Each structure stands twice: as C-alpha cells, then as structure tokens.
Image (tube, rainbow, N blue to C red):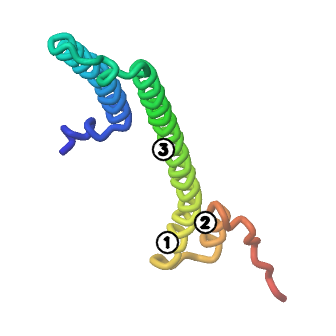
Amino acid sequence: MNRFRWFYHPIFIFVFSIVALAASLFLYIYWYMEVSAGLQAVVAKYQLDPEQFFEAQTWVVILVLSILVGIILVGVFLIFIYNQRTWQLYRTQRNFINNFTHELKTPVTSLRLYLDTFAKYELSREDQIKYIRMSPGLTFVSTPRKRG
C-alpha cells in the first residue's frame, strides 16, 4: 500500500490535472483544425458554399475556449495553494496540541511518581517533606510546626 502513497500526493494530483487539462486543450484545437481541413477538402471537392460550413468566428470560439481553460487552470492552482496552506495550518495546530498536552502530562506524571512512592513505602515525615520539596509542583508545603 505504501508503494502507491505517492499517487495520492496533492502535488502529483495537481501536476497530473494540469497536464491532462493542457493535453485536452491541445487535442481539442488539433482535432478542430483537422476537422476544419477535412471540411474544406469536402467543400472544395463537391464545390459547396463554404459559408454553410464555416463561420467567421472560428478563431473566436477557440480563443474563448482557451480563456475558459485558462480560468480553470488558475482555479485548480488556487485550490491547490489553499489546500496546501490548510494542511500546513492543520499540522501546526496538531503540533501545538501535542506540545501543550506533553507540557501538561510531564508535571502530572512527576507528581504521580511521588504519590506512588508515598503509597508503596512507609517513609518518615522528614523524608516525605524532603521529597515533597523536591517535587516540581508541591513546593508550597512548609515544615510542620511543633505544638506545645
């Protein structure tokens, strides 16, 4: 499955779409010119009225279709850029959340280690206070006062 991963890459899809669209435009113009030449040969052979087969705006049609294909190419390009920026923002957000949760988990894990130590072993009050002072989030505990 990893062999075909490049096939779904946005850059590959973008380049393939552009090449396919440009090839279709080229083939359309080529075939249109070929059909026009064939029609001209038929008109000349049978001595028909050329105005029935050819309009004066042939090049206008080709120009308009070329402009439309150009607009489509620009649209595909803009969508590609938008997609890439969206993925970049998604990766940035995911990295931020991962770093943030890591920063939250580190002190909690450290505190849990101290609490597990207190639960498993019987420590004297002085050792407990020493470990509490060394722990990163429990520095507010002071030495107990002696009553009396």
Residue denoted by label 1: 117
Residue at 19% over, 38% down? 3
Disc 1 to disc 2: CB gap under 8 Å: yes
Tell me the element at label 2. Answer: helix
Disc 2 residue type? Answer: Tyr
The picture quadrant where one finds residue 56 is top left
Q: Amino acid at mark 3?
A: Trp
Q: Earlier in the sequence, mark 2 or mark 3?
A: 3
> Where the N terminus falls, by quadrant?
top left
> In the rendered structure, which amino acid carries the disc numbered 1?
Thr
- Label 2 packing within 10 angstroms: few (<14), some (14-19), many (20+): some
Toward the right, the furthest residue is 148
Residue 16 picture location, percent across and down: 31, 30
Residue assigned mark 3: 87
Residue at mark 2 to residue at mark 3: CA–CA distance: 46 Å
Above or below for 14 versus 33: below
Give the Cα distance between marks 3 and 1.
Answer: 44 Å
Tell me which numbered mark, 3 or 1, is placed earlier along the sequence. 3
Q: Seen in the image, is 119 located left or right of residue 28? A: right
According to the picture, the residue beneath numbered tag 2 turns out to be: 131
Q: Could you tell me residue 125's position as x and y percent? A: 63, 77
Q: Quadrant of the C terminus?
A: bottom right
Residue at 24% x, 21% y: name it. 31
